Image (spheres, helix red, strand yellow):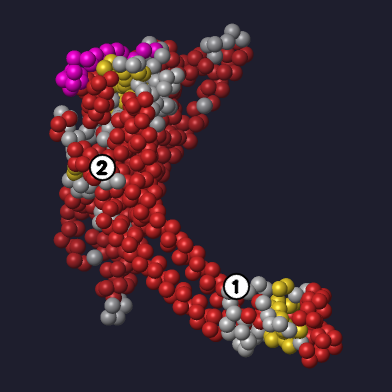
Amino acid sequence: MGVAELKKAELYYHRSVQEDVAKTLQHSGSCQIIETSGTTEPAADVAERLTLCEEQHTHLRYLFRSIGGHYTDPVSSIDRMLGEKPVLSMTELAQAADKTDLKTLAASVRKMETQLNALRLEASQLKTNASILSLLRDFPYPLSVLGDGTKTLKGLFAVFPADALEAFRASVAAQLSAETELFISPGASGDREVRVVVLYLRTHEPQVLDLCAQSGASPVELPSGVRDVVSAELSAIAGRVAELERREADLQEDLKRTANEWMPTLQRLFDYWNILSGRYGALASSDATDRTFRTSFWVPTTALPHLQKRLEAISPNVALVVSDPGPEDEPPTLLKNHPLARPAEVLTNLYSPPPYGEVDPTPFVAPFFFIFFGMCLGDAGYALVMGAGIWMLFRKYRRIPFSVGNFLNLFAMGAVMTFIYGAITGSFFGDFIDVVFFMAPLRPLKNALFILDPMGKPMVVLGISLLLGVIHLMFGLAVAAWDAYRKGNIVDAVGDKACWILFVTGLILVGTSSALPFVFLPGLCMALVGGCIIFWYAGRGTKNIFLKIGSGLYALYGSTSYLGDILSYSRLLALGLGSAVIGSIINLLGTMAVGVPYIGWVLAGAIVIGGHVFGIAVNLLGAFVHSMRLQYVEFFSKFYSGGGSIFRPLTLSTQYVDVIDPESGFSS
């Protein structure tokens, strides 16, 4: 129970068996490689293999990015997360890698992408040209007159400010008479700019340009190569765009066909090269000479005998030296708890694992979290839905990964406590059993289990919530006192931890003595003894009498923080009431909807089902977050700070397939 014992292992082996050794370590899934100081370069052959892995990953990343969007994966991300993956051996993956030239495939896809981008760029340019020419849709002359012009005639296409057009027209009429023609492109009334074509004699070009400049006109450059009338040019552009779009559709189809053909293989190769990258990374993290390697790693004591047996079977040129962690070492943390407490390891790791050799809070967190979760969600009907959903997941997915299974088990055990609390408080989808006529046969059973009434007697449930808070906090202090005692700090165990249990508990007993007079004297004695110890312990480090008194009083004043911590547990009542009230309101809306003519029952069913689905989602989130908060903020602050690192062994890390290799000698 708690933190698993680890050994520090140093493995010495000949270069000729490096591949077999790395493979054995990886397949065992129980060795976290200790990286070298980085003062030595990896062996040349290992560096070459790592380079190959990176090159293959580069091709794979490009292919995933380029054709992944064209592929409809038959396995959803949720299914894959829950273990719905094909099972293959490393031999099968290696055969697929040998048959696949990723470089050539990537070059082929890159060529198609280049062509596709060129088509899109040309089509975009043509559409831009069409938008420019559409401004001249009613221009009656060939567009060549606006480009090269004729021997005597030339044209200018420009944008004029709307308020300057009349002045420009008057200037042209006055200075150039009938030898200049204006064509004004139609536009919406109120436009601030007007598009104008000016046709003039070449001999008048300086005057025309000068008048345009005075009017604030901006010349518009026509697309190159347009010479025919506007309608013919627009028709040619439309035909070319249609052709480009057909070619683009053909290329898209080719990419989709390539994706459907290759993506399953690419997914497998991604995992294959990822496995090899981890394997060769372990060798690169080892110290090496011309002939030998030394790989250091952490390994659980329980996994050591089988690992040693497999390593010795590789070659006589393998030597394993095992030692306990030294003072200078910082071993990772591998949590190992009873199956009932194991789901709560998720909570510990989310906060921070304990340093190696320190107290693992998981078995202490588990019972309180499940109780708090059940009180916050507080509805037996919601618990049944949760339990049924989790059961269906485990039934459908037979190879759920350990970490995901742990998380589901956390909610499964929370559902059990929720059902118990919901049953004793009479909440089954709120008051569904009481208000729906066809649920009448279940009312005697519900009433027989009914013990607490949060709606009718909330103060009783509040008292239970606060009492659980006191127990929770005092238990945290007891764990802290025990931890200090096992480390030999007896004075700290008594003066900084156990004394607070006496003091706070004593104050609570004194405070409740009006209802229970017989607890006054024991409570007073406990508070006095605990207070004296706190007062002495806080000022024991100074010889100044005034500082001693000040330190002691300040320490006693810290008891007010416990009041705030205890009141935090009132959220157990609040969230439980929230679930019941929301459920009852949903049921009330459903019964009101029954009276709607023709569609009443259908509408009522939709309201009740949809409302309770919403209620489960919202209340489930609240129950998880607030139950977790009581652990992290109130409970952990009394004895736990975390700070460890999670044990991360070298494994067959995969995303798309499950790798099983019976020849490795290890179960996957």
Measuring 24% from the left and 22% from the top, which residue is drawn there?
Answer: 17
Residue 223 image label: 1
Q: Quadrant of residue 208?
A: bottom right
Residue 23 falls left or right of residue 508: left
The magenta stretch spans residue 418? no
Q: Which residues are magenta?
A: 308-327
Measuring 52% from the left and 16% from the top, which residue is drawn there?
Answer: 538
Q: Secondary structure at mark 1?
A: loop
Q: Nearer the viewer, residue 96 or 103?
A: 103
Against 550, is 259 above or below?
below
Can residue 622 be seen here? no
What's the distance in space between the residues labelled 1 and 2, CA to CA?
50 Å
Instruction: Identify residue type, mark 2.
Output: Ala
Q: Nearer the viewer, residue 377 or 330?
A: 330
Residue 250 image label: none
Residue 189 falls left or right of residue 562: right
Instruction: Identify residue type, mark 1.
Output: Pro
Which image quarter is the N terminus in? top left
Q: Which residue is mark 2?
A: 97
Q: Nearer the viewer, residue 300 or 381?
A: 300
Against 531, is 374 above or below?
below
Q: Secondary structure at mark 2?
A: helix
